[in-house]
Amino acid sequence: MILPILTQTDGLTIINKPPRLLVHRNPRLRNEPAALQILRDQLDTRVNPVHRLDRQTSGCLLFATDLSLTSALHAALSHPDAVKVYVCLVRGQLLEDGPIVVERPLKSARKVMQAARSVVYTLGRSPEPRCSILKVQPTTGRTHQVRRHVRGLNHPILGDAVHGDTRASRHWREHHGLTRCQLHCLHLSLPWEGGRLEATAPLYEDMAKMWRALPFWSAAVAAEPALALPAIPVPEALL
């Protein structure tokens, strides 16, 4: 398996993580491939993930290839000028175009409440099928932040097994070809070495095929042109 590289400079690499791929190995899933080990072998160097994407989530994933830069890259990704753009397909029509500012604290794995802020835009919506495509820009980096904040708007992400609507996801699997959580990290932009580090990740074909069939697809592309980038196939090992 070869991972698509979006941006590569001295000391760092941004890939377009495929869906259903772990970021790093999990002791409970010993036989599952992971992006860290695949990219290490692909580049023939040690790599370190600067942030995480859930297994089912695809899109921009930043790695340090100079491990001494990991902390600096993490700080850059957390900087107020950093921009992280996610797109997702959610249940129901979100009738506001946005920006909708969601400032709702989220509980960490250690049961500590942490401040969390996301800005949400509606790229398109329809009454049939009843759904919306949202653009979400988290300005903090809490666990499952995008998934939890859109659920708090009463528009859970389709295919989300933890924070979603099981009945709605089942309907979409049976009638629209849903195969996984409909969340993709479309764009990263962060301050780096006096300039900006940028990457945009095209959708994967499994997601793009379903989204293109939606009646508001043209409007969504007009609102976010990066959605129109040629989609790329999911590696066969992950189908």
Image (tube, rainbow, N blue to C red):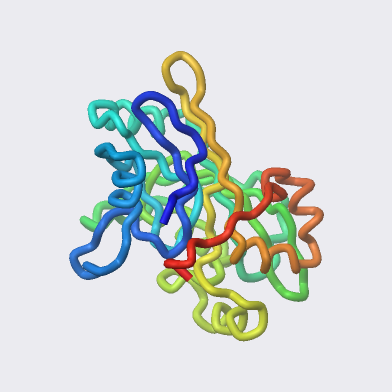
Number of numbered markers: 0
Res 10 → quadrant: top left
Q: Quadrant of residue 74?
A: top left
Residue 100: percent from the left, percent from the top? 62, 48
132 w.r.t. 169: above or below: above
Above or below — where is 41 with respect to 109?
A: above
Q: Is residue 92 above or below residue 100?
A: below
Residue in view at x 65 percent, y 61 percent: 208
Look at 48% across and 54% down and name the residue there.
Answer: 146
| Frontmost residue, 189 versus 20 | 20
Q: Outermost residue, top direction?
A: 194
Residues 193 and 149: in front is 193
Residue 204 screen position, x and y as percent:
58, 58
Q: What percent of the width, then of the height, locates residue 152?
A: 51, 62
In which quadrant is the N terminus drawn?
A: bottom left
Does residue 231 appear to the left or right of 126 in the view shown? left
- Which of the pair 94/227 is nearer the observer? 227
At 35% across and 52% down in the image, what residue appears?
35
Residue 235 placed where, x, y %? Answer: 48, 62
Q: Considering depth in this image, is 219 or 120 the residue closer to the camera? A: 219
The residue positioned 66% from the left and 59% from the top of the image is: 133
